[in-house]
């Protein structure tokens, strides 16, 4: 019979891994599910990029219109020049009924133009809200992945401890076996226990590899999610600042447009109109510049993120496939590798544990 | 009026934020709801919707209030419109448009079209203004001012539209005479409806009344005195109508706060006006009515009696202005 100092209870003790039972396939499926969330967020960013391009074009058109109108007021864009513009403007001023009827009310035109400006700023504000939600979702996702990373790390630790105990038992059984007569009942009993210990060693060293792989993969996934979240946050911060700046300028324009409505003197009307237009043009320019910068931002960051995520997918599949192939092929080598990994982990834990 | 917030550029508006904005929107909405309507006024329900949209922003709401009238400024009106469109607030829930223009054919007979044109806008002086014009146009050699369109609607020439839009801010009499000068146009009546000023004092909500206005006005003085004395909510809303009707009816001025245009003209201007009026007779009717909390309601009634006018004053409890 084997010696009483052998830790044979190790063979019967259940190992309390947390979470669902893990296999190569289930790990792949779980990571694929996490990646799906990232894909959705990247798709959202892609659609924002397209919307950005649309806004950029619309803004360029509006700025062109504003400039044209402003130039007209300057008298530089009309054949008859300044006096033609002034004459037309004078016809809007109450009390000057002898002048020709004008086709468009400047006040009404400015209000329409102002509304377009407000729409653009509201577009940007809505954009900020979308990005805020995206960012929040991504940080929630990071929390979830962190939970997985911790769970995998704990399971890896459990597997490593168990593998080392089993390895010690296998070695002790071997010493016992050599001490008894070959072919004796004791030797056969020891061999049976050795087989049982080896089977458990194979099973749990496989789990050790798997949990280790899962931990690394999830940690990498978390890094990508973090990059994505940071990208979204930067974009949101920039956009938020821009929206505030454009909004302030538009508020200035609104006050000036109302002043146009009350101005009784032609020169004041001219001056106020020019100011309103210039402020609105400034606001639009801020928007256009921002949207243009954002396009560059999108080009630099979104494409890089997509590339990195694609690389991540390739790497993950490759690692998992290798893992699968490994586990099917050289079991002993895998066990050795797992034991070495477990020993390494313990040595590291010992070095960092002050007790 | 002032409150917790920054000034709009140009200092024509003050920005109410957070609770002050919500309190303002609520109290203003109560006064508007109690205001008796008039066909020429901008739709008061939609103005209330505007206030509801402005107060319903998820985060701290901001409302730019025009200092001169106590009403939301162009900036706020435009934002409310854009936001409501995004939120799908349409139909009865839609806020007021910044500018609206509609023309309907009432009758068509041979070369003659009888139309009703209605517009409303936020005026340069910060008031909400509505205008209704009843016109007859007889097709002739002159410009095609009006063209029947789909259904009962009509298309209006840009120049006529601009004339109505621009002159809506002034006495209906001026629009009447300008329109009557147009070739082929006969004016039946022009009516204007004006909302404002709206004066609110909500001491508990950080919305305090503006003091020290420059113009001499007994109504403003009554308001200022009431605000100084009271630590409870106060509200006073003016509504005004001004009609110019073709015919021989005499002028009737029931506005205790403003005189007829006639009284403001120089001797030469009055002579010119009288000559035109001989050619195309018309009568002017002006009226003003109020919604007020105590003790302003009684003060306003007294001022109206003193001015010799008989005006409707709707009393609203101060408690109704606050939640």
Image: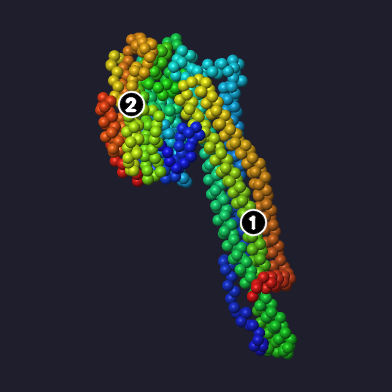
**Residue B17 drawn at (x, y percent):** 45, 42
Q: Residue at x 34, y 11 (%)?
A: B274
Q: CA distance from mark 2 to mark 1?
A: 71 Å
Q: How is the image coloured?
A: rainbow
Q: Residue at x 51, y 27 (%)?
A: A110
**Residue B172 drawn at (x, y percent):** 37, 20
Residue at the spot of label 1: A223
Residue at the spot of label 2: B257
Q: Nearer the viewer, residue A137 or A292?
A: A292
| Side of A37 where B160 appears, left or right | left
**Quadrant of the image for the C terminus of chain A?**
bottom right
To which chain does the residue with label 2 belong?
A: B
Counting the numbered discs, the total is 2
Q: Quadrant of residue A62?
A: top right
To which chain does the residue with label 1 belong?
A: A
Q: Secondary structure at mark 1?
A: helix
Task: Categorize mark 1 by other alpha carbons within 10 Å: few (<14), some (14-19), many (20+).
Answer: some
| Side of B289 where A278 appears, left or right | right
Would you place residue A43 above or below residue B253 in this image?
Answer: below
**Residue A182 drawn at (x, y percent):** 73, 88
Q: Are marks 2 and 1 on the same chain?
A: no
**Residue B293 drawn at (x, y percent):** 30, 38
| Side of B128 where A72 appears, left or right | right
């Amino acid at each position: 019979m084997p010696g009483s100092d052998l830790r044979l209870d190790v063979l019967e003790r259940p190992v309390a891994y947390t979470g669902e039972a893990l296999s190569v396939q289930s790990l792949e499926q779980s990571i694929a599910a996490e990646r799906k969330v990232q894909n959705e967020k990247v798709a959202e960013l892609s659609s924002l990029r397209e919307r950005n391009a649309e806004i950029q074009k619309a803004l360029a058109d509006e700025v062109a219109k504003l400039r044209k109108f402003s130039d007209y007021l300057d008298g530089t864009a009309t054949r008859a020049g300044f006096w033609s513009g002034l004459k037309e403007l004078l016809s809007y001023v109450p009390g000057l009924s002898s002048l020709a009827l004008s086709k468009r009310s400047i006040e009404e035109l400015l209000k329409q133009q102002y509304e377009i400006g407000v729409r653009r700023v509201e577009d940007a504000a809505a954009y900020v809200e979308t990005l805020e939600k995206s960012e929040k979702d991504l940080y929630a996702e990071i929390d979830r992945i962190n939970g997985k990373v911790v769970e995998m790390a704990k399971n890896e630790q459990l597997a490593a401890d168990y593998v080392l105990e089993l390895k010690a038992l296998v070695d002790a059984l071997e010493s016992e076996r050599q001490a008894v007569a070959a072919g004796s009942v004791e030797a056969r009993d020891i061999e049976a226990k050795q087989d049982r210990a080896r089977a458990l060693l194979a099973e749990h060293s496989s789990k050790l590899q798997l949990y280790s792989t899962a931990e690394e993969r999830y940690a990498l996934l978390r890094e990508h999610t973090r990059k994505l979240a940071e990208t979204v946050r930067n974009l949101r911060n920039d956009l938020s600042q821009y929206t505030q700046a454009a909004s302030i300028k538009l508020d200035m324009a609104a006050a000036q447009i109302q002043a146009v409505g009350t101005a009784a003197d032609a020169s004041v009307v001219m001056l106020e109109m020019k100011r309103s237009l210039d402020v609105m043009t400034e606001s639009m320019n801020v928007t256009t510049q921002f949207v243009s910068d954002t396009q560059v931002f999108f080009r630099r960051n979104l494409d890089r993120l997509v590339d990195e995520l694609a690389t991540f997918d390739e790497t993950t599949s490759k690692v998992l496939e290798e893992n699968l192939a490994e586990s099917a092929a050289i079991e002993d080598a895998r066990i050795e590798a797992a034991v070495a990994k477990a020993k390494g982990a313990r040595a590291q834990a010992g070095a960092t544990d002050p007790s | 009026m002032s409150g917790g917030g920054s000034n709009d550029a140009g200092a024509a508006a003050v920005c109410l934020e957070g609770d002050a904005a919500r309190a303002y929107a609520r109290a203003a909405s109560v006064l508007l709801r109690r205001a008796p309507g008039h066909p020429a006024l901008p739709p008061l329900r939609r103005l209330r919707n505007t206030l509801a949209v402005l107060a319903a922003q998820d985060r701290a709401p901001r409302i730019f209030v025009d200092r001169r009238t106590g009403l939301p400024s162009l900036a706020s009106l435009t934002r409310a419109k854009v936001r409501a469109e995004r939120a799908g607030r349409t139909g009865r829930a839609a806020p007021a448009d910044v500018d609206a223009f509609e023309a309907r054919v009432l009758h068509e007979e041979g070369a003659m079209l009888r139309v009703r044109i209605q517009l409303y806008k936020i005026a340069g002086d910060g008031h909400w203004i509505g205008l209704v014009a009843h016109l007859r146009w007889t097709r002739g050699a002159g410009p095609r001012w009006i063209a029947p369109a789909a259904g009962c609607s009509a298309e209006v020439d840009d120049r006529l539209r601009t004339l109505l839009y621009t002159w809506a801010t002034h006495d209906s009499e001026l629009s009447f005479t300008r329109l009557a000068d147009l070739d082929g146009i006969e004016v039946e009546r022009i009516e204007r409806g004006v909302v404002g000023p709206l004066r609110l004092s909500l001491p508990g909500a950080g919305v305090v009344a503006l003091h020290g206005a420059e113009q001499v006005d007994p109504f403003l003085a009554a308001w200022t005195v009431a605000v100084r004395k009271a630590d409870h909510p106060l509200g006073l809303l003016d509504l005004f109508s001004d009609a110019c009707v073709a015919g021989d009816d005499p002028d009737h001025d029931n506005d205790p706060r403003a005189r007829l245009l006639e009284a403001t003209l120089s001797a030469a201007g009055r002579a010119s006006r009288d000559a035109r009026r001989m050619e195309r007779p018309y009568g002017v009717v002006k009226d003003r009515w109020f919604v007020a909390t105590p003790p302003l309601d009684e003060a306003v009634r007294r001022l109206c009696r003193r001015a010799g006018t008989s005006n409707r004053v709707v009393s609203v409890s101060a408690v109704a202005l606050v939640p």
